[in-house]
Image (cartoon, helix red, strand yellow):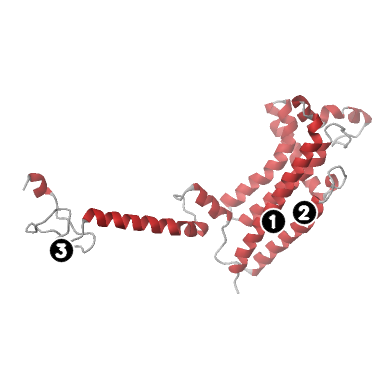
Amino acid sequence: MTASETDTPPQACPKCGYVRQASDTGPQAECPHCGVIYAKYLEHQFQFALSSKIAIAPEIAADQPDERAPLWLRIRAALWHTPDRINSLTLYGNAAVLIGTVIWGLWFILQPIDGDTVGASFLHHVDLPFHEFGHVLFRPFGTWLMFLGGSLFQCLLPLILLVYFLDWQSQPFSASICLWWCGQNFIDLAPYIGDARAMALPLTGEWSDEAVEMRDLRHDWHNILAPLHALPYDHVLAGLSKFIGTSLMVLAWTWGGMLLLKQWRKLER
């Protein structure tokens, strides 16, 4: 027996717990008591534990996100997080909000791009201050980005709030309403985009004939598309903006409805 074998502490069998004695004979890798081969047994246990973890991890992560879990599992957990208990006031309040967005949203989607209804909606007046702030926010990045900044920030703000409600507040239903609002903003922009060539829509701050005559210098989408030689595509881009907005609103309704179903299943009765 070599010095290295003498210094090695007795090995306990991972299956039966038997501790090898100095008087035991047979291979060092095999338990003298139950005959199991240590390496094969440990490998089998490892594979079993790994397969079990893979099988149950998605289910656990769906409601109990872990910072050590993969990113996609944490995102899925945030998207579908539902408290263990839901009271009726919360559920019915959320349902009323969802129904309201569906009723008003369907009416809004059906409005023509070249009509005046979209620009006269109550949410247009909510969106407008954020649109104007976007110009100020992006002014340091150049004239072209300043013109684009109004429309860009108008659509980005709901997405920023969506991340806030998902990541910081764990309120995916509120996040779904933010997604709906983002879609509404895309539709709200469609008439403005489609007016890039005609420049017939009145702009904010046109209180005099001189201001109206300067419309070509102030019209956002005219100044966005003209440097790109894309003015002939203003109607196509307006239709695309409305399509994106409609898709986001429908996606938000689907997401919100599925969250309400999960909440209803956990309703305190």
| Residue 185 seen in render | no
- Foreground residue, 196 or 175? 196
Image location of residue 15, percent across then percent down: 23, 62
3D distance between C-alphas at marks 1 and 2: 10 Å
Q: Earlier in the sequence, mark 3 or mark 2?
A: 3
Q: Dot 2, how many residues are within 10 Å of its Cα: few (below 14), some (14-19), or many (20+)?
A: some
| Residue 50 seen in render | yes
Q: Residue furthest right?
A: 209
Q: Earlier in the sequence, mark 3 or mark 1?
A: 3
Q: Dot 1, how many residues are within 10 Å of its Cα: few (below 14), some (14-19), or many (20+)?
A: many
Residue receiving disc 2 = 105
Image location of residue 57, percent across then percent down: 45, 57
Left or right: residue 50 versus residue 147 is left
Mark 1 secondary-structure assignment: helix
Mark 2 secondary-structure assignment: helix
Amino acid type for the residue under numbered disc 2:
Gly
3D distance between C-alphas at marks 3 and 1: 64 Å
Image location of residue 110, percent across then percent down: 82, 51
What label does residue 253 carry, if any? Answer: 1
* Residue positioned 64% across, 44% down in the render: 160
Q: Earlier in the sequence, mark 1 or mark 2?
A: 2
Mark 3 secondary-structure assignment: loop
* Residue positioned 47% across, 48% down in the render: 70
Residue receiving disc 3 = 33
Question: In this picture, is 135 found above or below 249?
Answer: above
Amino acid type for the residue under numbered disc 3:
His
